Image (cartoon, rainbow, N blue to C red):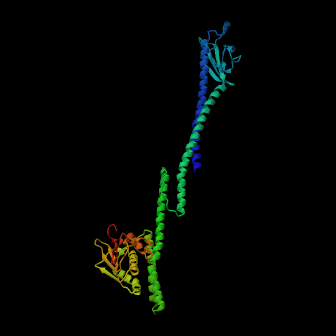
């Protein structure tokens, strides 16, 4: 990249200087030629001013003005013979053409100007002034060389500036490349970098945002794996219990056994679907809560395990409960709270359902046990002080918050967890 930028800048500079230098060189050459002829004209005029009415006649000596040594002045008579000065013995073609007006042209290696000397409209003499063409060529070459020198200086400056600009552009682009490689290797700690170049800064910011989204998505996927493994334990345990019970004491109606197994399999599928939807920020559908069906399903899933533990599960409804919530999410949260009461509580676990004062659903899961640690620590994921996996309550709170609700410890003695879910039909829910 640096090389391409440098070559591009130098190339543009060379093209620009060439476009400017060639016309300037042509103009300079024409100007030097015009200056040379004007110098010849002035020398011819000064010579003519010194001529008499009959130059060179009767032995008259012709005077010449002082001119640079590279100028050659000669005076010719009307017959073409040289009367005085430095030049050909006979008038050359350019001098012969000077009848009434001055004539100028190149004659071999000389630049020649011939100016007729007129008296009463009669050509008395011809003044010929010449100089080597090489003199003008040298002056032109010198001017062109100066232009080329300036061009080389401009190209050198362009190379220096191009090198600086290329390095300044290459550094942030190289950092972007390194960040992209790190992101591809799974390192999401990519921060937006400021370079002062708007487009590159926007790209860096977009890459940083992408890294953040990928990290969050990966965290959700990992969380889903842990949550799914935790939540699948309950329906798997129920399925295992059903199969083992059937093996120990087979019933004659095999269809009923298969229906129970299919129910547990459906529960497994529903658990995976719900957790995956929440992990991907796709809220499960909300519907009107059928409290009777919910209570029936709770007892169906948990009564067997409570009986094995010699304990009791009780569900009660206070008043009329008429709300719209995500039943799948509510089921998952209740399973976590009931399992927590079964594993860490004591006595009867009570699940109470009622309407919230300002709309919504309030669920309280209570047992006679006591919480002897900081209640807020119970919801820390992978809490080192947890006696279990340290996932369940954290997952339950995350599910509640994903639905716009909240899950808190209502009391520590007796132990009571309170879940509040908003009514999905309420404005802003």
Q: Residue furthest right?
A: 89
Residue 92, percent across and down? 69, 19
Residue 19 placement, left or right of 243? right
Is residue 141 shown above or below 4?
above
Q: Which of 216 and 29 is in front in this view?
A: 216
Q: Is residue 69 positioned above or below 155 on the image?
A: above
Location of the C terminus by quadrant is bottom left
At 45% across and 86% down in the image, what residue appears?
242
Instruction: State the count of labels.
Output: 0
Asked whether the viewer can see residue 147, the reply is: yes
User: Residue 322 at what x, y percent from top left?
Assistant: 31, 76
The reply to whether residue 12 is in sight is: no
For residue 301, what is the image quadrant? bottom left
**Front position in the image: 14 or 36:** 14
Residue at the limit of the structure toward the top, as seen here: 58
Q: Position of residue 55 (x, y in %)?
A: 64, 10
Position of residue 407 relative to residue 250, above or below, is above
Q: Residue 356 location in percent, x, y?
A: 30, 73
Q: Residue lying furthest bottom in this view?
A: 252
């Amino acid at each position: 990249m640096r090389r391409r930028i440098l070559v591009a800048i130098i190339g543009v500079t060379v093209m620009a200087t060439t476009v400017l230098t060639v016309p300037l060189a042509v103009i300079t050459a024409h100007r030097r030629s015009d200056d040379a002829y004007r110098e010849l004209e002035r020398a011819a005029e000064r010579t003519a001013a010194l001529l008499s009415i009959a130059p060179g006649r009767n032995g008259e000596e012709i005077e010449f003005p002082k001119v640079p040594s590279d100028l050659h002045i000669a005076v010719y008579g009307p017959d073409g013979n040289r009367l005085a000065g430095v030049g050909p013995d006979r008038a050359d073609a350019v001098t012969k053409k000077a009848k009434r007006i001055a004539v100028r042209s190149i004659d071999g290696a000389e630049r020649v100007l011939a100016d007729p000397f007129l008296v009463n409209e009669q050509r008395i003499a011809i003044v010929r002034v010449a100089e080597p063409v090489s003199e003008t060529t040298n002056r032109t070459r010198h001017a062109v060389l100066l232009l080329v020198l300036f061009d080389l200086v401009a190209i050198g400056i362009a190379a220096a500036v191009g090198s600086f600009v290329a390095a300044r552009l290459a550094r942030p682009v190289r950092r972007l490349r390194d960040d992209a490689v790190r992101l591809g290797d799974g390192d999401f700690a990519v921060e937006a970098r400021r370079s002062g170049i708007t487009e590159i800064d926007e790209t860096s910011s977009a890459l940083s945002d992408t890294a953040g989204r990928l990290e969050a998505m990966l965290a959700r996927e990992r969380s889903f794996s842990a949550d799914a493994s935790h939540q699948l334990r309950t329906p798997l345990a129920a399925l295992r219990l059903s199969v083992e019970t059937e093996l120990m004491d087979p019933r004659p109606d095999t269809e009923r056994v298969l229906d129970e197994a299919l129910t547990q399999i459906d529960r497994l599928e529903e658990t995976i679907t719900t957790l995956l939807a929440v992990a991907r920020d796709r809220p499960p559908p909300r519907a009107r809560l059928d409290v009777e069906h919910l209570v029936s399903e709770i007892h169906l899933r948990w009564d067997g395990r409570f009986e094995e533990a010699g304990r009791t599960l009780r569900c009660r409804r206070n008043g009329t409960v008429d709300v719209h919530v995500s039943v799948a999410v509510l089921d998952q949260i209740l399973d976590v709270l009931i399992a927590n009461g079964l594993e860490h509580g004591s006595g009867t676990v009570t699940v109470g359902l009622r309407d919230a004062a300002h709309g919504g659903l309030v669920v309280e899961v209570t047992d006679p046990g006591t919480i002897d640690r900081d209640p807020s620590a119970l919801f820390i994921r992978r809490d080192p002080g947890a006696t279990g996996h340290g996932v369940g309550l954290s997952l339950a709170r995350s599910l509640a918050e994903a639905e716009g609700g909240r899950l808190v410890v209502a009391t520590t003695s007796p132990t009571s967890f309170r879940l509040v879910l908003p009514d999905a039909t309420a404005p802003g829910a």
